[in-house]
Amino acid sequence: MSQPTPPHPTPPPHYQPGPPGYQPSPPGYAPPRKKRRWPWIVGGIVAFFVIIGIAAGGGDNSGPTGNGGPGAPAAEAGEVVYEVTGQGTGEAMSITYVTNAQFNQAQENGASLPWSKTVDLGNGLFNLASVVAQAGDGTTSITCKITKDGEVLVENTSTGQYALVTCSGS
């Protein structure tokens, strides 16, 4: 008669139990060190803000420089002209626009159309000009336009009551 076999063989001395499918490391083997990524992420974020700060440095924080429109003086370097026009009753529910190189914004509500504003964005690397307008009650279409030095950077039109139109350029 043979000896009964134990239900489980005895594990080797270096065996460490773990989750199912776990393979223990051979004795004397050190797992690889995890690479730290956070210093690279923080460095990238800091570099981004430094570049933005250098590009926007020296900008004028005074905001809008006055109304443009027919007979307005020619724009100086860094100045853009925002224009919003519409069909119908000629009113914009709201007009929101970037006012300077630090991307500050201003909003005018219930503005009568046509509307225009000349803004000095400075001469930085990133001079983002942006205007968003929403048509008012009875206005059937609304158009925005951004010009710099007499050249149209962007022009868009949206139709329908309460339509929203966006223009962005640099």
Image: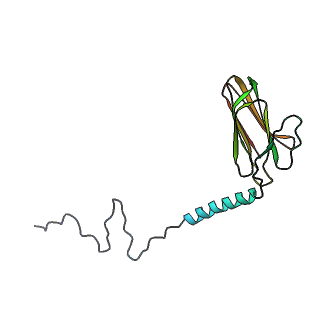
Which residue appears at 75% of the width and 47% of the height?
63
Q: Is residue 20 above or below residue 127?
A: below
Q: Image quadrant of residue 10?
A: bottom left
**Residue 90 in the figure: left or right of residue 17:** right
Is residue 37 visible from the viewing direction of this image? no
Q: Looking at this view, is 71 or 128 the one in front?
A: 71
At which x and y percent is residue 47?
Answer: 66, 62
At which x and y percent is residue 123?
Answer: 81, 53
Is residue 93 visible from the viewing direction of this image? yes
Which residue appears at 81% of the width and 42% of the height?
66
At which x and y percent is residue 141?
Answer: 72, 26
Which residue appears at 71% of the width and 23% of the height?
140
Q: Looking at this view, is 161 or 42 the one in front?
A: 161
Which residue appears at 59% of the width and 61% of the height?
41
At which x and y percent is residue 113?
Answer: 77, 29
Q: Image quadrant of residue 93?
A: top right
Residue at the outermost bottom position: 28
